[in-house]
Image (spheres, rainbow, N blue to C red):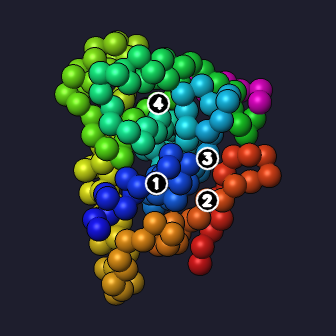
Amino acid sequence: MSIKEKFQTLNEDDLRQKIIMPLLFVLGCNDVRDNCGPAEYGKDILYLCRDHFLREKIWGAVLIKRDEINKSSLDNIHRQISDAINQFIDPDDPRNKIQLHEILVITSRSITSEALKYINEQSGKNFQNIHFINGDRLEFLINQTIIDFNQKNRGVYIFDVETYSGICGRSFVKSQKGGSEGKVID
């Protein structure tokens, strides 16, 4: 079974916590937060990157879909992107409001060209920095992290849903507050 076939069997919660959140961390996001719930406002995951050349915090959000993004899901995706681009309260300092710098739309399946065109025409008018990651691209990114891990550790890690977060250096588990928190894996 391929990596893509393995993560396509996951429900949205497991895809978010076991694959996407650890992947964001290993790709360079310093702070990855599970934001999924009734008050997410289109942001399933929030992430923060502090390595910007201007030494600024760069906030991003991830919208996750387990199924194909096509004509039937466009209204929902557009609504979620519109909700996500609104300012929100800084989770670290409630006195401040935050504006997202980018949005990732991730699906474990495919995104039709019709859906890409629609989202870019509708949501892209209000927010230019939307990135799309379909199942093929997600599999590519996971493969790259495995290659990097194997080269660095002279290992032969083979993808497994249950152990992937361990090679990323962070495992995400449900916290008492209902979201997920990262636990460093040594």
Q: Residue 172 carries which label?
A: 2
Q: Is residue 62 magenta?
A: no
Which amino acid is tagged 2?
Answer: Phe
Up-down relation of residue 84 to residue 156 (above or below): above
Residue 85 appears in the figure: no
Up-down relation of residue 130 to residue 149 (above or below): above
* Secondary structure mainly formed by the magenta segment: loop
Q: Do the residues labelled 1 and 3 touch (CB within 8 Å)?
A: no
Compute the Cα span from label 4 to label 1. 29 Å
Residue toward you, 9 or 160? 9
Q: Quadrant of residue 46?
A: top right
Give the secondary structure at mark 2: strand
Give the secondary structure at mark 3: strand
Compute the Cα span from label 3 to label 4. 16 Å
Compute the Cα span from label 3 to label 2. 9 Å
Q: Is 111 situated left or right of 171 in this image?
A: left
Compute the Cα span from label 2 to label 4. 24 Å
Find residue 98 and report its horizontal and vertical position in percent: 61, 27
Q: Quadrant of residue 103?
A: top left
Compute the Cα span from label 1 to label 2. 16 Å
The residue beneath circle 3 is 33
4 or 1: mark nearer the eye: 1
3 or 2: mark nearer the eye: 2
